[in-house]
Image: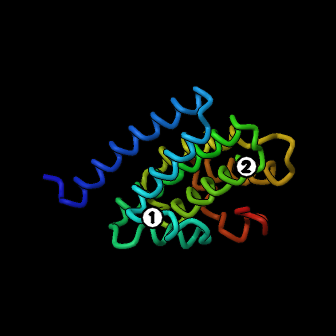
Amino acid sequence: MPSQKQDYLLRLIEELGRLVTEIVKLRNQGSYDAALHTLLQAQERLFSRPAEEFVGRPIEDQVKLLVLGENPANAREKCLLYATLLAEAASTYQARDQAALALGACRWALHVLFLTRQESPDADSSALRARLGALLDQLPTDDHLAQELKDLLRQLAAPSRAADGINATDFPASFPP
C-alpha cells in the first residue's frame, strides 16, 4: 500500500499531466499568454507555494525548496516534473518567437536535470536521458553557448558511465542564464 506521501505524489503527477495537456493545447491554439499562465499555476502546484516564494531565486535554491522534506525518490520525481514544466515554457516561448526566453527556460530545465543526475547518480537514468535528449533538440544550432551545452549534455545523456566525470564546474559561467 502506498504511503500518504507517495499517494500525494501520484495525484500531483496526474494533476500536472492534465495541466501540461492544457498548456500544449493552448500553445497549439496560439493562446500563449494563457499557456504561460497555466504553466505558472502548474509550478505553484508543484512547489505547493505561491510563485513569489520561488521565482527569482537561483535555480539551485528553487530545487532545494522543491525537494524540501521529500525522500530521494519523490525528490527526483518532483525535479523531473519541474524540468518538464520548464521545457514546456521553452516550447511556448519558442512558439511565441521569443528565442532568448526559450533558450533561458531550456537552460534552466537542463540545469534541473543536471542537478537531479548529480543528486541521484545510481538511479535509473532512462527517463532523465530521454528528457535530456528532448531538450537538446530544442536548443538552437546557431548559438555558441547552446552548442557548448549540447556537447556537454550529449556526454551527460549518454547511457555509459562516461558522464560521471562531469560536474557543475564544467558548465559555462553564464549557465544558467
User: 47 or 141, which is in the foreground?
Assistant: 47
Determine which quarter of the picture holds residue 32. top right
The earlier-in-sequence mark between 2 and 1 is 1
In this view, 64 is above or below 177: below
Asked which secondary structure carries label 2, the reply is helix
**Which residue is depicted at the point 40% across and 45% down?**
16
* Residue 84 shows in this picture: no
In the picture, measured across the screen, residue 62 lies left or right of residue 123, that is right
In the picture, measured across the screen, residue 42 lies left or right of residue 88, that is left
In the picture, measured across the screen, residue 161 lies left or right of residue 14, that is right
**Residue 158, x across and y down, in percent:** 61, 47
**Which residue is depicted at the point 60% across and 42% down?**
33
**Residue 120, x across and y down, in percent:** 46, 63
- Mark whose residue sits in front, 2 or 1: 1
- Amino acid type, label 1: Pro
Q: Residues within 10 Å of mark 2 (few under 14, many from 20)?
A: many
Residue matched to label 2: 103
**Which residue is depicted at the point 24% across and 61% down?**
5
